[in-house]
């Protein structure tokens, strides 16, 4: 039987494929300012149903597949790489990281255990150390990169469960705000906690968790024979961008013997800036912190991180052995990521972070984050100057929320008019905003986190808002 060589392309073949990919990617990036932001409302259901297909027995020409990806499939989506995308919490997706992925996938090194690829593991360990330094964590801290904040939150919660509760954990109670990211609640359920043991407490008028309310709830739970064990604060909520009083929450957690976790997926990297460090004071005292480099470090989706103040807790929670495994590290200066995280087989995520930071340095990223803070303050001042609109969630970092003014309107009328404004803005397709609901109020969100977003795009938003208000008669 003759061996097949179909998957073993020549150097010339690979060069042709790479040139074709680069040409399409560069064309996309060079025209990013003119690409529509939202084509989902034009999605063709016939085309989408036609995509349901069995696996092919024979191959298709690469050029035709590229055409399908770039000219058809990518058009049926939102475009969060656009400088006008101000919805959710986008990062823009640095292409540098895509180049790193090509390299890491081609080399295909295993980085779950240091003995197999020690230099690459150390590069990723350096990335974690950089993140710890940004947050203000001590040398005892450890962490790992994940696919995103959801998986990082799950590991954080399981680590807190292991450290504070052990195996008898069903009486453990978790305290969060009603503005916390839903992945925290989901993590609690996946970690085996009863839904009734998740205390989602009402926030104050500024959408922040109230330490006094937390304290009263803890006391009531202890009186019922339950075991409070974890308190979660937000370093910038997804809903409104609110920053919880981290210093006060940490003090309460320590007094009550609770694990203090901070969801910094959106806001944590603002610690690189002077203003962000001031706003997020107390984050450095948390037992664990989640970060999402694919948000405010501008990397592509699939890049999250968990940091733990005392790294030994990660190892005691996640360590496992197998006879087929190579020896693990005894030296605390080095790390085996399979000993700190749920994954044994894992991609070399570190390179997609390491390469952009080494190319540009943290000072460049800091400057971009400072610009986003400036833009948020600028657009907030412009909205405040429009009598028909009011800011209901001021920008603490780079997210803010506004509505049509409430004067003389019922809540339903106000919410309906805010929806009309959002629809008008998004149909213009120069800016894309999203909305949320808090305390019954429909809030239009502005999330400034794409690295390509600059003052010119914010000026477009002001123009579109003024036009919307005039056309709609508000």
Image (cartoon, rainbow, N blue to C red):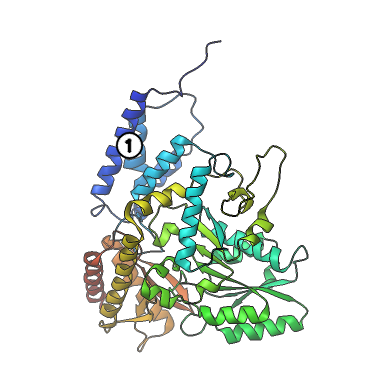
- Residue 447 seen from this side: yes
Q: Which quadrant holds the C terminus?
A: bottom left
Q: Nearer the viewer, residue 393 or 212?
A: 212
Q: Position of residue 281 (x, y in %)?
A: 47, 77
Which residue is the site of mark 1?
A: 21
Q: Position of residue 175 (x, y in %)?
A: 62, 75
Which residue reaches farthest bottom? 408
Q: Position of residue 192 (x, y in %)?
A: 70, 61
All told, the count of numbered labels is 1
Which residue reaches farthest top? 1
Residue at image x 52%, y 63%?
A: 290
Q: Nearer the viewer, residue 410 or 71?
A: 71
Q: Nearer the viewer, residue 430 or 334?
A: 334
Residue at image x 39%, y 42%?
A: 47
Q: Is residue 312 left or right of residue 407?
A: right
Residue 155 position by quadrant: bottom right
10 Å crowding of disc 1: few (<14), some (14-19), many (20+): some
Residue at image x 63%, y 51%?
A: 339
- Residue 450 seen from this side: no
- Residue 352 position (above or below residue 280): above
Q: Nearer the viewer, residue 388 or 135?
A: 135
Q: Is residue 136 left or right of residue 313?
A: left
- Residue 121 position (above or below residue 389): above
Q: Position of residue 78 (x, y in %)?
A: 37, 54
Residue 260 position by quadrant: bottom right
Where disc 1 sits, the SS reads helix
- Residue 111 position (above or below residue 396): above
Q: Is residue 45 left or right of residue 125?
A: left
């Amino acid at each position: 039987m003759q061996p097949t060589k179909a998957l073993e392309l020549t150097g010339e073949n690979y060069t042709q494929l790479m040139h074709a990919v680069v040409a399409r990617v560069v064309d996309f990036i060079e025209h990013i300012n003119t690409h529509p932001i939202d084509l989902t409302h034009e999605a063709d259901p016939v085309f989408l149903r036609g995509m349901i297909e069995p696996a092919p027995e024979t191959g298709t020409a690469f050029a035709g597949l590229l055409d399908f990806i770039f000219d058809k499939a990518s058009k049926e989506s939102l475009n969060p790489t656009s400088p006008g995308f101000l919805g959710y919490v986008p990062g823009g997706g640095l292409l540098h990281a895509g180049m790193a992925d090509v390299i890491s996938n081609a080399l295909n090194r295993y980085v779950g255990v240091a003995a197999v690829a020690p230099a690459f593991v150390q590069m990723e360990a350096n990335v974690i150390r950089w993140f710890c330094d940004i947050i203000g964590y001590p040398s005892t801290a450890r962490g790992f990169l994940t696919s995103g904040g959801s998986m990082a939150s799950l590991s954080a919660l399981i680590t807190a469960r292991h450290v504070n509760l052990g195996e008898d954990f069903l009486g453990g109670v978790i305290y969060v705000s009603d503005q916390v990211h839903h992945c925290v609640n989901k993590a609690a359920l996946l970690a085996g906690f009863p839904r009734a043991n998740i205390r989602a407490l009402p926030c104050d008028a500024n959408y922040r968790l109230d330490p006094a309310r937390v304290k009263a709830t803890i006391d009531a739970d202890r009186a019922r024979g339950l075991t409070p064990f974890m308190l979660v604060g937000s370093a910038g909520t997804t809903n409104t961008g609110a920053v919880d009083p981290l210093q006060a929450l940490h003090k309460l957690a320590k007094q009550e013997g609770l694990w203090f976790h901070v969801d910094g997926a959106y806001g944590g990297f603002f610690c690189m800036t002077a203003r962000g460090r001031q706003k997020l004071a107390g984050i450095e005292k948390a037992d664990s912190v989640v970060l999402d480099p694919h948000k405010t470090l501008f990397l592509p989706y699939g890049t999250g991180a968990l940091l733990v103040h005392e790294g030994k807790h990660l190892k005691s929670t996640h360590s496992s052995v197998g006879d087929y495994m190579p020896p693990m590290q005894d030296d605390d200066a080095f790390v085996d990521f399979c000993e700190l995280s749920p994954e044994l087989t894992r991609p070399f995520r570190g390179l997609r972070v390491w390469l952009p930071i080494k190319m540009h340095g943290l000072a460049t990223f800091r400057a971009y984050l400072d610009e986003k803070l400036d833009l948020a303050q600028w657009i907030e001042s412009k909205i405040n100057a429009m009598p028909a609109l009011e800011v209901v969630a001021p920008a603490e970092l780079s997210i803010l929320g506004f509505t049509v003014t409430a004067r003389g309107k019922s809540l339903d009328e106000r919410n309906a008019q805010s929806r009309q404004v959002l629809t008008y803005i998004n149909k213009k397709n120069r800016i894309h905003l999203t909305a949320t609901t808090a305390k019954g109020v429909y809030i239009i969100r502005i999330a400034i986190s794409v690295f390509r977003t600059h003052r010119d795009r914010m000026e477009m938003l002001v123009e579109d808002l003024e036009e919307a208000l005039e056309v709609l008669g508000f």
